[in-house]
Image (cartoon, helix red, strand yellow):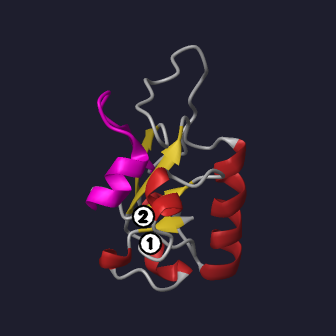
Amino acid sequence: IYINKTKGIERPQDLNGRRIGELALYGHDAGVMPKGMLSDEFGFKPEKCRWIIGGIDFPLKPIDWLPKPVPQGVDVTYANDDVDLGEMLEAGEIDALISADAPKCARRAADRWPAI
């Protein structure tokens, strides 16, 4: 989980109520596990967040051929076709990013875009 340090996120509980990016689909394997751990261990509530779905280092169009079940009450939108989640994290348009892959901004300057 990568965070934008300017957003005041210091501990996992601070993710509640934030705009969080997730790769490709809400609820894919690499997203389910961290959300479950955050919920069980830190009281994280996915339904309190706004989820932005897209590509990590390149824009990603919605995957239309897969069903996209989203739990009731969870706010999920797709990133615009011309931006990616790494850019959005760097620009402060999302507060955090759940990703198995480090976005370019974290690879360039890990101290500015730490993982929690």
Instruction: Tell me, yes or no, whether the highlighted magenta stretch contains residue 94.
Output: no
Tag 2's secondary structure? Answer: helix
Looking at the picture, does residue 47 appear above or below residue 116?
A: above
Looking at the picture, does residue 90 appear above or below residue 51?
A: below
Which quadrant is the C terminus positioned in?
A: bottom right
Residue that badge 2 annotates: 48
Left or right: 82, with 116 as reference point: left
Tell me where the magenta segment starts and ends, as one range: 74-92
The amino acid marked with disc number 2 is Lys
At x 62%, y 50%, the residue is 101
Looking at the picture, does residue 39 appear above or below residue 22?
A: below
Instruction: Tell me, yes or no, whether the highlighted magenta stretch contains residue 87.
Output: yes
In front here: 85 or 77?
85
**Quarter assignment of residue 69:** top right
Q: Position of residue 106 (x, y in %)?
A: 49, 62
The reply to whether dot 2 and dot 1 touch (C-beta < 8 Å) is yes
Report the Cα–Cα distance between label 2 and label 1: 6 Å
**Quarter assignment of residue 42:** bottom right
